[in-house]
């Protein structure tokens, strides 16, 4: 059958990406959206859209019955699940087909067989796919350590624990089982050896109903945070040809063992010695599929639709690979603060366009990043003839991007791509465990040598603000040009800025002489060449540097070559009314209070490090901890409360002999 109208049972970037292929093929598109997504980009780009009342994923995108009803109401004849949400839910796939709709995905039986990691491993063993030997936790000994505990259902790092001490095993088993049951409705957990410094390597497969199975090369996805991928590339670098062949053959065998059709990914762990072990098969399109598309010159979504329509793949063998591709996931999160997700208005999102570059995004400038969903903003992909060229192209594109609004991981991505270990392809899943502190050095917005420093960027901000203050409304101002600055008898003025997110403060002195044009005060080696409210050009020790500026209320965003900075303008004098009481527990991000510690009330005694309040936002759960032992003197939070960042949740009057602890600890949620 021919697909005429397709509903995408997803949101954000993947929905927009699927719609793009549908437009190329002349297929009418249908979006579904929650109340929180009413103005989202994927809704604006679809031909038709159907509301799923409410905002929480459990009440909207995870409600298969509502999604099927939406498809029928919109007149769709097919459903594409995207990734995440219901994409690997066999019951949903069956419901789509029972409703007379075409399912753009693998057979229901294949999803069922691969849904449980324990059952999948048994099946793969029979197909000759290399596996790690399972370990029975009841009989595990010291020689079996370290162990990796994993949930039998689901993924994304939920229900996963690394056990390095035998005494910790019983408690970690209980915790992993509880987390798995909460996230996936299945508390089954299994154990296997934990491979130190292993690489995460996967093979993209594409299969049709005519016994053709393609192995579309390898991808390396070793750079991960909390078991979720950050940077991916194809082909996986540094693999011997024999190992590549073995991975391809194992992936094809896995697909054939379950009668697979459509796009899927077989994931492996490759040890430091080069031995591969099957991890799981994802029965859907992967987030990182664009790097494979770039290297093989294919459109995987178009191939999915072709196979779903009953057509064979266009050739018995896949096309030849060409070049190298690298993808970076741009997240609204703060890597320096335990990857804390960020929310708020995304004022600007501009990524350079050019040969070899691709942007897959679910946001544009002016959109709002809410609290309900994953904090990924976009994927930036670079393709070039060699790995070195692709990495350089991607790092340069990210560096030149203009991203204003919530804190993002952009600087981390650029620094990761330029890290000596990444450049040399010394890759393993412990990369960020070892290097995160160096990659998130406080007070540095620069990602390239010679890119300036925060103090100079703050000077540019102060000069632009001084010009703005003297510019009357009307036509765009003519740039003020300076040959240099003069020492004239006028008192310096001071502006204060706080760097975000690290909190470093900068005090900038400047003068406004009788000419009315501001000049830096006591800044040797600096010449002001031009200045307007949105652009300042400085000569710094003989080198000319341009600064672009944008203001949003008290925030100033400064972009220059190789660096981007965010400042909060501070009052000249601190207002005592803005100070909080000692022991105040503030919300680290906007979110929902999901629960309180049992019996928590004003007057209760608390212990240092005791979890008091659980706050959830964008798949992250933060435990707000007692900073020290003492007495809870005030409680301003209740389950169900929606709170803004900085909201006062509680106050602990501490015992002066107590040892302070961090105020919050993040945990991944389903």
Image (tube, rainbow, N blue to C red):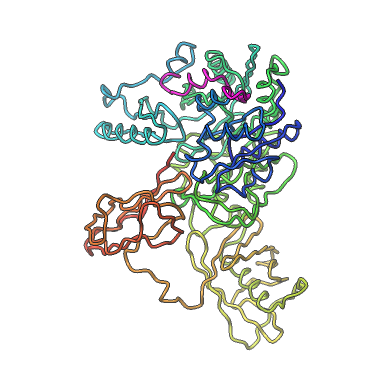
Q: Residue furthest bottom?
A: 489
Count the labels in the image: 0
Q: Is residue 177 above or below residue 441?
A: above
Q: Is residue 289 above or below residue 479?
A: above
Occupied quadrant, residue 168: top left
483 inside magenta stretch: no
| Residue 342 visible (yes or no) | yes
Tell which of 228 and 270 is nearer to you: 228
Q: Is residue 584 left or right of residue 22?
A: left
Looking at the rendered image, the quarter that the C terminus falls into is: top left
Looking at the rendered image, the quarter that the N terminus falls into is: top right
Q: Is residue 563 above or below residue 380?
A: below
Q: Position of residue 542 (x, y in %)?
A: 69, 66
Tell which of 70 and 651 is nearer to you: 70
Tell which of 275 and 575 is nearer to you: 575
**Which residues are drawn in magenta?**
97-120
């Amino acid at each position: 059958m021919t697909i005429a109208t397709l509903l995408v049972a997803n949101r954000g970037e993947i929905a927009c990406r699927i719609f793009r292929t549908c437009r190329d093929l002349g297929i009418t598109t249908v979006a579904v959206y929650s109340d929180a997504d009413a103005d989202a980009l994927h809704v604006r780009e679809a031909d038709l859209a159907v509301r799923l009342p409410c905002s929480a994923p459990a009440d909207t995108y995870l409600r298969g019955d509502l999604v099927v009803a939406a498809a029928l109401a919109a007149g769709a004849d097919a459903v594409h699940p995207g990734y995440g949400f219901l994409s690997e839910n066999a019951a949903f796939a069956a419901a789509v087909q029972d409703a007379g709709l075409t399912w753009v995905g693998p057979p229901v039986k294949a999803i069922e067989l691969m849904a449980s990691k324990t059952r999948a491993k048994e099946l793969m063993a029979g197909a000759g796919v290399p596996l790690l030997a399972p370990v029975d936790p009841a009989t595990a000994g010291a020689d079996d350590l370290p162990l990796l505990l994993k949930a039998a259902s689901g993924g994304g790092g939920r229900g996963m624990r690394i056990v390095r001490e035998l005494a910790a095993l019983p408690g970690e088993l209980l915790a992993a089982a509880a987390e798995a049951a909460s996230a996936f409705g299945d508390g089954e957990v299994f154990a296997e050896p934990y491979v130190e410094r292993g690489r995460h390597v996967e093979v993209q497969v594409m299969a049709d109903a005519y016994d053709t199975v393609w192995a579309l090369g390898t991808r390396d996805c070793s750079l991960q945070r909390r078991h979720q991928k950050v940077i991916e590339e194809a082909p996986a670098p540094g693999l011997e040809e024999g190992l590549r062949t073995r991975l391809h053959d194992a992936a094809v065998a896995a697909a054939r063992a379950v009668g697979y059709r459509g796009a899927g990914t077989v994931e492996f762990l490759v040890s430091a010695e080069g031995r591969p072990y099957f991890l799981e098969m994802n029965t859907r399109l992967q987030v990182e599929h664009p790097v494979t598309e770039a290297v093989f010159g294919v459109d995987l979504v178009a191939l999915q639709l072709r196979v779903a329509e009953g057509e064979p793949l266009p050739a018995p063998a896949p096309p030849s690979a060409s070049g190298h591709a690298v993808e970076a996931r741009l997240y609204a999160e703060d890597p320096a603060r335990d990857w804390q997700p960020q929310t708020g208005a995304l004022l600007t999102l501009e990524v350079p366009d050019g040969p070899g570059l691709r942007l897959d995004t679910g946001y544009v400038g002016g959109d709002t990043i809410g609290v309900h969903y994953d904090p990924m903003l976009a994927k930036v992909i670079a393709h070039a003839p060699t790995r070195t060229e692709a990495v350089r192209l991607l790092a340069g594109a990210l560096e030149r991007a203009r991203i204003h609004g919530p804190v993002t991981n952009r600087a981390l991505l650029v620094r990761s791509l330029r890290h000596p270990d990444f450049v040399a392809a010394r890759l393993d899943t412990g990369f960020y465990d070892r290097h995160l502190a160096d990659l998130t050095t406080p007070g540095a917005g620069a990602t390239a040598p010679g890119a300036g420093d925060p103090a100079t960027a703050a000077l540019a901000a102060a000069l632009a603000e001084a010009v703005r203050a003297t510019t009357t409304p009307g036509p765009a101002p003519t740039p003020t040009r300076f040959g240099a600055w003069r020492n004239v008898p006028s008192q310096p003025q001071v502006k204060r800025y706080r760097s975000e997110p690290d909190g470093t403060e900068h005090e900038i002195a400047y003068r406004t002489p009788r000419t009315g044009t501001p000049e830096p005060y006591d800044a040797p080696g600096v010449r002001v060449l031009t200045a307007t409210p949105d652009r300042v050009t400085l000569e710094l020790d003989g080198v000319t540097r341009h600064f672009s500026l944008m203001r949003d209320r008290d925030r100033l965003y400064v972009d220059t070559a190789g660096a981007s900075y965010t400042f909060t303008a501070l009052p000249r004098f601190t207002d005592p009314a803005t100070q909080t009481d000692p022991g105040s527990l503030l919300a680290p991000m906007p979110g929902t209070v999901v629960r309180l510690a049992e019996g928590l009330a004003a007057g209760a005694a608390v212990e240092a490090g005791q979890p008091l309040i659980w706050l959830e936002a964008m798949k992250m759960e933060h435990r707000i901890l007692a900073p020290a032992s003492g007495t809870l003197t005030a409680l301003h939070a209740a389950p169900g409360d929606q709170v803004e960042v900085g909201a006062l949740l509680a106050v602990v009057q501490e015992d002066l002999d107590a040892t302070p602890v961090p105020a919050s600890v993040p945990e991944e949620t389903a």
